[in-house]
Amino acid sequence: MYNLDDSLKMQGTWSVSDDGKTRTINAYDGNGKLLFTRVVEIVTLNSQEFSYRVAGQNGQYTDIIHKPTDHTEPKS
């Protein structure tokens, strides 16, 4: 995963549950050691938007929304 300035944000694997309700991300350091696993509830998943919900403080939630961009894909 890259930031919009093309700097590496994290590396890892991700998957969507068979029922399409959750996304799981496994983030790894440069040596392949697991840093964290995060499972989030999918709110929207289609060709125009991927959004998911994360638990916040005091029982509140935040929806993270990803939409397509025309930003050139970073070179690895």
Image (spheres, rainbow, N blue to C red):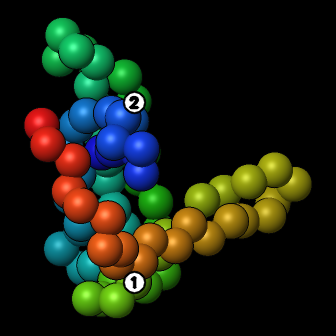
- Residue 12 quadrant: top left
Comparing labels 2 and 1, the label whose residue is closer to the camera: 1
Return the residue nearer the eye: 72 or 31: 72
Tag 1: amino acid: Glu
Q: In the displayed orientation, state which residue is furthest to the left.
A: 76
Mark 1 surroundings within 10 Å by alpha-carbon count, few (fewer than 14), some (14 through 19), many (20 or more): few
- Residue 26 quadrant: top left
Q: Residue at x 41, y 77 (%)?
A: 67
Q: Residue at x 66, y 57 (%)?
A: 55
Quadrant holding the N terminus: top left
Tag 2: amino acid: Phe
Q: x%, y% of residue 74?
A: 21, 47
Residue 21 appears in the rendering: no
Residue 69 appears in the rendering: yes
Q: Earlier in the sequence, mark 2 or mark 1?
A: 2
Q: x%, y% of residue 66?
A: 44, 71
- Residue 36 numbered mark, or none: 2
Quadrant holding the C terminus: top left
Mark 2 surroundings within 10 Å by alpha-carbon count, few (fewer than 14), some (14 through 19), many (20 or more): few
* Residue underneath mark 1: 49
Q: Is residue 13 left or right of residue 48?
A: left
